[in-house]
Image: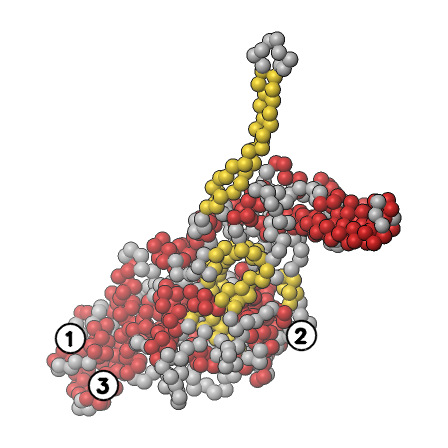
Amino acid sequence: MAQTQPVEVLLRPAVELYTAAVCAGAAFLSVVAPWALALNPVLGIGSALAFTLFGSIRLHQALGILRYRRNIRRLPRYVMTSRDVPVSQQRLFIGRGFQWEQKHTHRLMQTYRPEFRRYAEPTPAYLLARRLEERLEFAPFPLSHLTRLTSWDVRLNPVRPLPPVGGLPRLHGIEPDEVDVSLPLGERVGHSLVLGTTRVGKTRLAELFITQDIRRRNVLGEHEVVIVFDPKGDADLLKRMYVEAKRAGREREFYVFHLGWPDISARYNAVGRFGRISEVATRIAGQLSGEGNSAAFREFAWRFVNIIARALIELGQRPDYLLIQRHVINIDALFIEYAQHYFAKTEPKAWEIIVQLEARLNDKNIPRNMIGREKRVVALEQYLSQVRNYDPVLDGLRSAVRYDKTYFDKIVASLLPLLEKLTSGKIAQLLAPNYADLADPRPIFDWMQIMRKRAVVYVGLDALSDAEVAAAVGNSMFSDLVSVAGHIYKFGIDDGLPGARAGDKVPINLHADEFNELMGDEFIPMINKGGGAGIQVTAYTQTLSDIEARIGNRAKAGQVVGNFNNLFMLRVRETATAELLTRQLPKVEVYTTTVVSGATDSSDIRGTTDFTSNTQDRISMSSVPMIEPSHVVSLPKGQCFALIQGGNLWKVRMPLPAPDPDEVMPKDLQQLAGYMRQSYTETGQWWDSIAIPGLQEQPLPADLLDASEHDAAPDQDEAAVPAPPNPPDDAQP
């Protein structure tokens, strides 16, 4: 396909075949009948070899033209099993493709010219076959088999349908010589952003990356940490993670946290581990609205939760959502408990005075701002107002109970709905685990434990059922990860363990699917500074508008996007999102040909020439963008533009997944995957079956059945669905 002419034209008849046929005939004659070419037998054999060599060269060029014309209409199928995915210690495999250059822009522009349209557009026979299939869909017996013949997907069928991927095959077919495209692992610390509309292959690309991350080992034989956030709940992604973890021998370090399946989910305390006590209040109050008048209520909620968290730590209790909710509703009990703890250490006799003050109180001598409070709280306040005690925790609790109770309930009203979301039903068992319950087989994990164990974690947030809870839990997890990343950055991952060395880090591969659903203010410092702790974020979302709408600030959205060094752009429908890629690319010079013809009349009436004419082919150069936003919009499924390695543009297509016979999951995870698959594929009816399928039809026990006949209609929120039997110990994630 090498061209010596200034303008490369590959969309043309393969005229090299004529030369190859002539050379083949001449070589045949040179061997069979050399006398026909005035050659002796010895020279005939030499001439045959020369003709064969030249004909082979021309045949190779002709096949290149034919292959180019075929790829413009239809790309060859690219399928790979997960077992065959290459895993390297140096590079991350993406797919097959080519680096986009000026010649590819030139070739792409040629496909839109009218004279080359017949090579790029479907043939009339293809269009006729598709029209017949539409008309004969419900035809009787003889004609119905005709559509099966035209839709037969074999190479011998000249009108076989195109693969159901849509888009323009020409975007990738302009370069027949593909190579394996990979990203150096050193570039992943700069984070990667994958953009694409729904159902175009974002999750499949995530599976490709996650497969390699799970199976990769460093030179010392150590695995990497893999954390996947999946708000919508993709069953195929969960299955892929478990299968790859089992193949790598890491099924014991595989954790599943799923809000929609609490019976087999691992447990996690989102506020139980922190570097500073103020992080507890930040993770909770960060979920509240900070716009307009809500900012004041958010700041008060932060202060109030911080007071409670400090008191719980001083009392030796680990904060969780249930404890915080309990004390938000009734701050008096915490004030009394902490006062007992404080005075027992500092002033043992003070409690006697407080009891005496409590006995003197009645409805007449209670201050107006303390009406509705317990008498012991009022007595504590009176005692502390007379005695100088400078305990910051006690002072904070004291300032909280000084508020009028009615006014206090109003200003914490914005906090209670959030805590109610996080502590309702069985979700409370996941987010506020009972550490003392040894009979519960569900594991409890925290991020530092995950890092040290080099574990694999799947976080399913069930956002289709409850987006509010999913966002709150996701943001709390992100905030916890930022805290752990800061600790690792300062002290290393094995801080406090024997033989630990400061600065020891491991790659932490964080995959956030639909990360706009999870993103808050906690996500920005993670991508800004998380790379120093080894965190490598790969975020997947649909459009830039999703990010901006979630954050609510255009500048912050630009701050988030600007921290991703690697960009993978699949098909998008928003022009502004496509321009995120196209505006970063330079303009290139392409050749264009123009046919100029003209005629000139002769002014000599006596001459023999009446007119003269001329026709010229003019070659000019024009500056055009390397790719247009319309090209991004027209991408087929499973293909993307990759801007990696400091601005190098690659055109990539990902391998289609092929089933493996050994991909088997435990029974409990199979049930979970089945429920997730149903919820994900039938999201239009998600409200019809919130509970686990098959459990709603189970009869009530006999004792409950007798009681239900006499009681009123039970509250649906309090009714518990019978839990499935506990899976065996060896099947626990």
Looking at the image, is mark 1 or mark 3 nearer the viewer?
A: 3
Tell me, yes or no, whether the two marked residues, 1 and 3, touch with CB atoms within 8 Å: no
Element type at mark 3: helix
Give me the disc on residue 662.
2
State the image quarter where residue 505 is shown. Answer: bottom left
Quadrant location, the C terminus: bottom right
At x 62%, y 55%, the residue is: 177
Looking at the picture, how far across and down is residue 341, in whole percent? 25, 86
Residue that badge 3 annotates? 342
Query: Which of disc 2 and disc 3 is earlier in sequence?
Result: 3
Looking at the picture, how far across and down is residue 333, in whole percent? 29, 79
The amino acid pointed to by label 3 is: Tyr
Q: Residue furthest bottom?
A: 348
Q: Nearer the viewer, residue 347 or 242?
A: 242
Crowding near pointer 3: few (<14 within 10 Å), some, many (20+)? some
At x 73%, y 42%, the residue is: 125
Residue that badge 1 annotates? 365
Q: Nearer the viewer, residue 159 or 98?
A: 98
Looking at the image, is mark 1 or mark 2 nearer the viewer?
A: 2
Q: Nearer the viewer, residue 416 or 263?
A: 263
Crowding near pointer 1: few (<14 within 10 Å), some, many (20+)? few
Cα separation between marks 1 and 3: 27 Å
Above or below, 83 against 1 in this view is: below
> Horizontally, is 183 left or right of 72 in the view?
left
